[in-house]
Amino acid sequence: MNTPQTQNPRGYKLSFIINTAVGGFLLLLAIIAGFFEGLFPAVRGQLVWGFVPATMICWFIASLHYSKYLSLSK
């Protein structure tokens, strides 16, 4: 069975929006974790670094999908 070769720019736009929102939420969690690290010195340096790489990965994927969306929408 043959799959269609045309790509839908709407899917890339939706993925860009979702990945940007998830990255923003993870950044908010990292900020909250930073406050907790300030309040509780026993967990200093452990909480924030779980959220920062995930935020960067989400925003990197979002940027790739946005550029693909722009190239398909021309």
Image (spheres, helix red, strand yellow):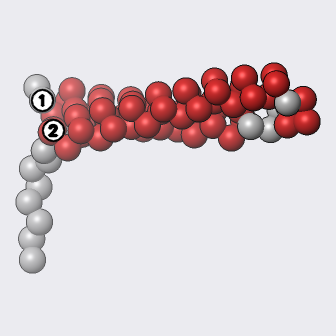
Give the residue displayed 59% in from the left and 32% down from the top.
Answer: 29
Q: Nearer the viewer, residue 11 or 17?
A: 17
Measure how far apart labels 1 and 2 are at the Cα level. Answer: 6 Å
**Looking at the image, is 2 positioned above or below residue 72?**
below
Q: Secondary structure at mark 1?
A: loop
Q: Quadrant of the C terminus?
A: top left
Q: Which residue is mark 2?
A: 9
How crowded is the residue under tag 2: few (<14 C-alpha within 10 Å), some, or many (20+)?
Answer: some
Relative side of 71 to 59, left or right: left
Whether residue 27 is visible: yes
Number of on-image labels? 2
First reached walking from the N terminus: tag 1 or tag 2: 2
Q: Quadrant of residue 73?
A: top left
Amino acid type of the residue that numbered disc 2 sits on in the rendered structure: Pro
Q: Position of residue 37 (x, y in %)?
A: 79, 28
Q: Secondary structure at mark 2?
A: helix
Kindly give the residue lying farthest to the bottom in the view shown: 1
Q: Which residue is mark 1?
A: 73
Q: Position of residue 40 (x, y in %)?
A: 85, 30
Q: Position of residue 19 (x, y in %)?
A: 39, 37
Q: Nearer the viewer, residue 31 or 8?
A: 31
Q: Position of residue 27 (x, y in %)?
A: 55, 28
Q: Nearer the viewer, residue 23 or 3?
A: 23
Relative side of 50 to 55, left or right: right
Amino acid type of the residue that numbered disc 1 sits on in the rendered structure: Ser
Kindly give the residue lying farthest to the right in the view shown: 42
Give the residue displayed 54% in from the left and 34% down from the top.
Answer: 26
Give the residue displayed 8% in from the left and 60% down from the top.
Answer: 4
Q: Nearer the viewer, residue 9 or 33?
A: 33
Whether residue 60 is visible: no
- Circles 1 and 2, Cβ within 8 Å, touching? The answer is yes
Give the residue displayed 9% in from the left and 77% down from the top.
Answer: 1
